[in-house]
């Protein structure tokens, strides 16, 4: 007897269409951002790599002894990699509707597709850059570190979740409030210095610690450094706080976009 082939359900058909749409949006962004430059997509990797190593080299010349370990370049990278992974995701997802606005006029392309496409592309790029950074640093400098993979993966996952959440929320707020982009830029300007990129939480005064604790990136950098420095045991870190903070921001962003995405696109 021949097998009976049942037609795909409505849910399966929607998932298939959504997958094709997301793939097309990813390819469009890769072509738009990197297709016209020599080297193409390779610049998506070289640009952040160059900035990380240039800043790490500059700071290593100024600060000979890092707060942890023997390599200031590694110490800097363990703070800067999660920060830049979060920031890149948050900034690109926040502009997802503007970038894909012409395509969102079609009924088959949804605002969810636009956000997911940018999340997947920039996540893949960011993770590849992170791996290259740490591999190169361990090859060119005497880091004297033992890797613990679980905290590293945990910290990178928290960075991705936080970036997606803040990006989704800002995507809605920037579409609803004209001055939100400028306001957010002003509010987060000190974020680089307040995220533990150049210092340890434990080295700050108690009053400063009480403020820094509410910055999720401070927790993430502490967790990531646990994966590179076996003797480092930050007691202040809270994964539950980072997850809860991110889920609340993501929930608010999704609710606002679901309710107001048509008004945002028609502005």
Image (cartoon, rainbow, N blue to C red):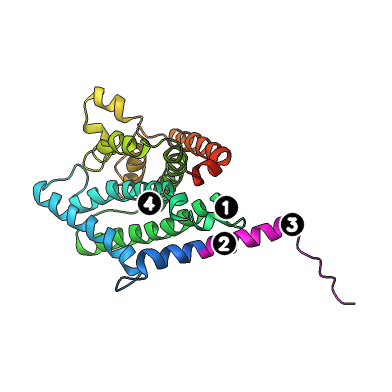
Identify the disc placed on residue 110.
1
Which of marks 4 and 3 precedes in the sequence?
Answer: 3
Which badge, 4 or 1, comes first in the chain's sequence?
1
Alpha carbon distance from label 2 to label 1: 9 Å
Q: Residue at x 28, y 35 (%)?
A: 186
Q: Can you say which quadrant of the picture contains the N terminus? A: bottom right
The quarter of the picture where residue 245 lies is: top left
Tell me the number on the disc at residue 176: none
Rendered image: mark on residue 148: 4
Dot 3 or dot 1: first in sequence order is 3
Reading the chain from its start, which is encountered first: label 2 or label 4? Answer: 2
Q: Secondary structure at mark 1?
A: loop
Q: Secondary structure at mark 2?
A: helix
Q: Please check the rendered image and state whether residue 19 is part of the magenta-colored stretch, yes or no.
A: yes
Looking at the image, is mark 2 or mark 1 earlier in the sequence? 2
- Are circles 3 and 1 on residues that touch, CB within 8 Å? no
Residue 119 placement (x, y as % from top left): 46, 53
Residue 219 at x, y percent in the picture: 36, 37
Whether residues under marks 2 and 1 lie with C-beta atoms below 8 angstroms apart, the answer is: yes
Estimate how packed mark 3 is, as few (under 14), some (14 to 19) or many (20 or more) residues with alpha carbons within 10 Å. few
Q: Real-space Cα distance between discs 2 and 4?
A: 38 Å
Q: Is residue 220 magenta?
A: no
Q: Which residues are magenta?
A: 1-24
Q: Residue furthest right?
A: 1
Which-is-in-front pick, marks 3 and 1?
Answer: 1
Residue beneath the point at 13% across and 52% down: 58
How packed is label 4: few (under 14 Cα within 10 Å), some, or many (20 or more)? some
Which callout, 3 or 4, points to the residue nearer the camera? 3
Q: Which residue is mark 3?
A: 10
Q: Nearer the viewer, mark 4 or mark 1?
A: 1
């Amino acid at each position: 007897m021949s097998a009976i082939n049942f037609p795909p359900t409505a849910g399966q058909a929607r998932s298939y269409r959504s997958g094709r749409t997301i793939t097309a949006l990813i390819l469009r962004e890769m072509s738009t951002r990197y297709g016209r430059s020599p080297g193409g997509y390779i610049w998506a990797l070289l640009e952040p790599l160059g900035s990380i190593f240039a800043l790490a080299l500059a700071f290593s010349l100024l600060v000979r002894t890092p707060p942890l370990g023997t390599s200031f370049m590694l110490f800097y990278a363990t703070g800067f990699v999660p920060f830049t992974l979060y920031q890149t995701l948050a900034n690109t997802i926040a502009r997802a509707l503007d970038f894909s606005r012409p395509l969102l006029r079609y009924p088959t392309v949804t605002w969810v597709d636009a956000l997911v496409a940018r999340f997947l592309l920039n996540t893949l790029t960011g993770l590849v850059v992170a791996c290259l950074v740490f591999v190169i640093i361990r090859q060119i400098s005497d880091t004297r570190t033992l890797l613990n993979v679980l905290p590293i993966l945990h910290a990178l996952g928290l960075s991705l979740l936080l970036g997606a959440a803040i990006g989704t929320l800002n995507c809605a707020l920037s579409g609803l409030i004209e001055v939100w982009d400028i306001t957010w830029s002003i509010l987060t300007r000190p974020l680089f210095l307040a995220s533990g990129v150049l210092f340890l939480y434990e080295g700050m005064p108690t009053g400063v610690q009480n403020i820094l604790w509410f910055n999720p990136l401070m927790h993430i950098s502490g967790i990531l450094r646990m994966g590179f420095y076996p003797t480092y045991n930050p007691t202040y870190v809270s994964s539950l706080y980072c997850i809860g903070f991110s889920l609340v921001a993501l929930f608010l962003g999704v609710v606002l976009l679901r309710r107001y995405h048509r008004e945002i696109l028609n502005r």
